[in-house]
Amino acid sequence: MPFCTQCGQKVDGMKFCSNCGFAVPESASKPAHKPAPKPASKSFRPTSKPLPKFKKNVTGNGTVMPSYRGASSTTIESKHVVKKAGWTPPIKEIKSSGGSTILTGHEQWVFYNNKLKCVSTGKGIMALKNALPMDKPGFVHFRIDAENVGNTGSGIITTANIILQWKGPKSTTMSKVKNNAALQSALNNIEPNKGFIEVLGTQNLSTANVFDRWRPGSGSKVIQDD
């Protein structure tokens, strides 16, 4: 703090002493300057590193899943599809022409369900008995080549495609009702055919019995178990 050199009066910021009138030196009248603060060293400046970037989860169709609660991605666990063991080859029809099945040999057959969709095909009465489901009805397009039908003579072969209306013994009542309702449609669409007989079981199912029930003058049109 500056003082007058003559009388000792305080002369802070004054050009002349208020007590004795002595001129105050210029250096004493100016207030003292505070030194400017030194700038902080660059080495002490706080630094921040950018946060690491995470890969977003991308679904199989290329869309990015949204993030929740600050998470960079959401992981979706893919469903594991378990395939059934084994493989069933597709069913091949024997021949078809204009939507109708053509049977070309004795005891050839095609089995249809109630919706007239081909389920299986084969040849031989034993193969047919093994293929018929016990719990489902349907229709069989069955071919027989018989001799001397209607006393036409020895050596004369008659070919007939017959509809077997199959009603498995374990079929439900409703499925049998639907089978009866589909009978006329089967006769109209499973061609060529020469009528139908009803089959209720496989115990007495044979080519001879099919012919016996179908032949002209036969009393019964049903093949059933004993």
Image (cartoon, grey):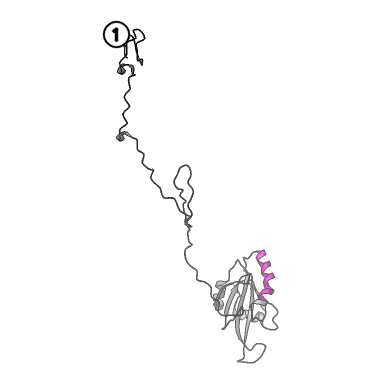
What residue is at 67 percent from the left and 64 percent from the top?
A: 174
State which region is magenta: 169-187
Can residue 146 be seen?
yes
Can residue 222 be seen?
no
Q: Amino acid at mark 1?
A: Gln
Classified by dominant secondary structure, the portion drawn in magenta counts as helix
| Camera-nearest residue between 2 and 138 | 2
- Left or right, residue 3 beside residue 211: left
What residue is at 65 percent from the left and 66 percent from the top?
A: 175
- Left or right, residue 60 beside residue 195: left
Packing grade of label 1 (10 A; few <14, some 14-19, many >=20) is few
What residue is at 68 percent from the left and 73 percent from the top?
A: 183
Within the image, what quadrant is residue 216 found in?
bottom right
Vertical side of 10 occupied by 106: above or below: below
For disc 1, the marked residue is 6
Within the image, what quadrant is residue 52 found in?
top left
